[in-house]
Image (cartoon, rainbow, N blue to C red):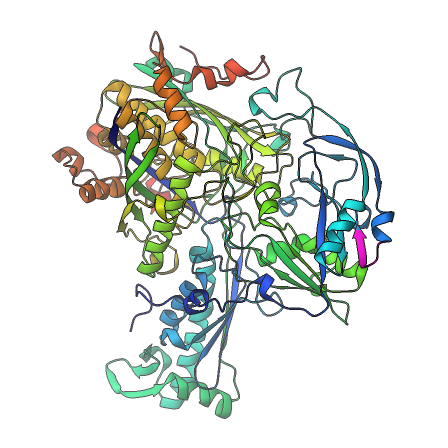
Amino acid sequence: MAVHKGRGIAAIEYPTGMNQNGDPSQAWIKVKPDGRVDVFAGTSDIGNGSKTIQSQIVAETIGVPYDWITYDNSNTDSSPVCTGTFASRATFVAGKAVEKAALKVREKILEIAGKELEIDPSDLEIADGEVTAKGAPQKKISVADVAAAATWGHGELITGTGAQLKPYATIVDPETGLVDLPPHSAISYASCAAEVEVDDETGVVRVTRLWQCFDVGRALNPTLVEGQIEGGAVQGLGLGVLENCYPYYPSVEHRGAQFGSYLAPSTEDLPQIDTIIVENPSVDGPYGAKGIGEMANNPQPPAIAAAVYDAVGVWVTELPITPERVLRALEAKAEPRREGKLVVFDDELSVNTVSSGGMRFEVPA
Amino acid sequence: MKAVGARLPRYDGVAHATGRTVFVDDVRIPGALWVKALRSPVHRADITGLDVSKAEAMKGVRAVITWQDVPLLEYGHLSALGIPADEPLLAKDEVRYKGQPIALVAADDEDTAMAAVEAIEIDFDEKPALLDVRQAFDPDAPVIHQWGNWYPHFEAEMDRRQIRKGDIDRAFEQADVIVQGVYRPAAIEHVPVETQSCQVVPEANGRLTIYSCTQALYFSLGVVAAHLQVPLNKLKLVGGTVGGGFGGKVDTATETMCCLLAQKSGRPVRWRWTREEEFLCSSTRAPWHMEIADAVTNDGWILGRRMLTLHDSGAYARFSPYGLTKHSFHHTGAYTIPNLHFDGYVVFTNRVPTTAMRGFGVTSISFATETHMSRIADVLGLDPWEIRLKNANRIADTSPNGVSYTDPSTVSVVKALAEGIGVELSAALRAMTRDPREGDLLPEHLVAQVGSLEEVH
């Protein structure tokens, strides 16, 4: 009877944006008479930080401080269309819409600044809320003064709209699954290593350490990226060793109806988490970003399963890897069936064993 | 100061951390009625009698609704994509899962609403349930859905999602070893801190103001408008700040029903699911059944993959056809496998309908393909790092559905992970990049799949 340590790895990919696309996001921006910026977008913030990221994109694109931005996604009367916060699309797709709207606002600010400074707008740039002449920074006007001039002098509203929509990728051949266009906005990649301790007497798997490496394209806000990755890791740990709506699936009995009987991860389950951010910028995401919100909980379960095998020599391929499943696997010590060049694991779980003939998984030997 | 790339404070961080963020249930509307649901107590039954008259007559009860009150009873999560609807907003002739809503009550207070739910008279004729996706196709399985036990409306009215690529038979003939396994990740709950919640105010001008915890304001706007058969200007969704979603709040679980009660009673209504309802009646992540057989060579090339996926959709389709399609598009994981034979089915069972959840359609694939990858390495006695780097997606490799990869990063993230945990890779592995394949990394079996570089650049 002992505690065994093991380590396993996994590498994964995940698409950004709705599968097959066709998911619009729109934004509109207006500027107050003192240059402060109001952003209206329909992107729900589900804790993923989309209010923050989209505000950063607007601040960066126009060239004003982050705290000049007011972000309003509060209702469908004032906010334009956003398909929603899912499919890892809030930064990439909705963020692209606010970037496009902000570019138009920037253009309008430069146009009015050009009139005020009597300089061609193409010779001007904006940073930190100041419009300056390229190569002659003493010639300048603040964005606040530009906005005031627009309002009180030129009788204009500084505003801009943006929309992002990748066309729907049609499956042109349902027999093969071929599509006519890329069915994603970008693809992100990640890897993970899990270190576990498995008690061969109790069957308990404790995840002691997770290393997580994500290619995020570009980390628009590294703190929020780390938050997504670490939060995802904990959810992946839940998938791996704790959570199950149907403990004896496919039976629907013994469902947990409260926190005491449904094991969601809590602080006592937390392993040490190390996060490695890789930046291979995407071609057309805002500032090179890719979405990683969802995939953050995908690489841990297979890394944990491999680590359990490394520790105690059994594969548990039904999730979660509960003490009961570990103990049963240790007791069975099942070896794969070998037949010619076939190496067959998990015969007892196969549709070929359970179905009375309606469905088969055919593999030529 | 640059905004992009900076560790700027979260826009709403202080409000969240100090408890001042206003979520749906924090909105106080004077005179709002409490809503409670009558839900199916059984997994599958015909409804043989439904009488709400005693509930309606109770003091303090302001409205009771059933399927008869819904202008468009069935509107699918994917109706906007032309996929037919299968799920009634409120059960009509039958119930297909325990917890399915049948009738709703709006009353002056919570106790009255609960008492009125108890007073609804209902009769069932219970039927055998189907729970195991592996038995759904069997001749003796009960048929539980109007479309049969699996979804029949993929393109060209196919009853499964297929991927076919390359020459699968040749790959299996050429294989040194065929490794086969079964992978079954579980259904899990989204466990949002904020349970499903909604409040609706019928305005004097006839509009409905809907305080919603939806993850998708405009998607939900469209769903409510379709059920109510009203133009979009009759509705105002107020939301955008969600107390945890993880996919479960893409379902528009409460909004339409609250609108109907607000219209019928002429009063504001509020519905907050109990934690028990959230655990037992809200949609879950799907359980998946996946079988993989990979044709591999002794030196660790994956020549081909046969795969069967049974996606447990629960009682209705919701987003499952979308999820399975996404799943099929990504069923080679972070690797390039040139010969593929994938069949996937959306299978109906008598459990709570499953829906989107973080990683939708692909979390299952990541578990199956990566655990399988580790098994293959073990069976062949190969280094798990090497087999991953060798088969990794490279620029101009093609995806299962024929799209050239433009910026794959399998190699980058595997190498960075090795470095991060102090695993010393061989010089050959360290030299790998994501650039298009050549030399030893472009063996005969991978030549034909390489896509056009013009498509990439």
Q: Is residue A327 magenta?
A: no
Q: Residue at x 20, y 38 (%)?
A: B432
In this view, A288 is above or below B279? below
Q: Residue at x 66, y 40 (%)?
A: B99
Side of B15 relative to A82 (left or right): left
Q: Is residue B146 visible?
A: no
Which residues lie in the magenta part?
B58-64
**Residue B362, position as x, y percentages in the image:** 44, 38
Q: Is residue B61 magenta?
A: yes
Side of A345 relative to A350 (left or right): left
Side of B224 relative to A174 (left or right): right
In this view, B127 is above or below A124? above
**Residue B415, position as x, y percentages in the image:** 22, 41
Side of B185 relative to B27 (left or right): left
**Residue B264, position as x, y percentages in the image:** 81, 58
Quadrant containing the N terminus of chain A is top left
Q: Residue at x 81, y 44 (%)?
A: B120
Nearer-the-camera pick, B175 or A239: A239
Q: Quadrant of residue A8?
A: top left
In this view, B210 is above or below A129? above
Q: Quadrant of residue A305?
A: top left
Q: Is residue B100 visible?
A: yes
Residue situated furthest top in the rendering: A340
Residue situated furthest left in the rendering: B427
Nearer-the-camera pick, B172 or B28: B28
Quadrant containing the C terminus of chain A is top left
**Residue A235, position as x, y percentages in the image:** 41, 44
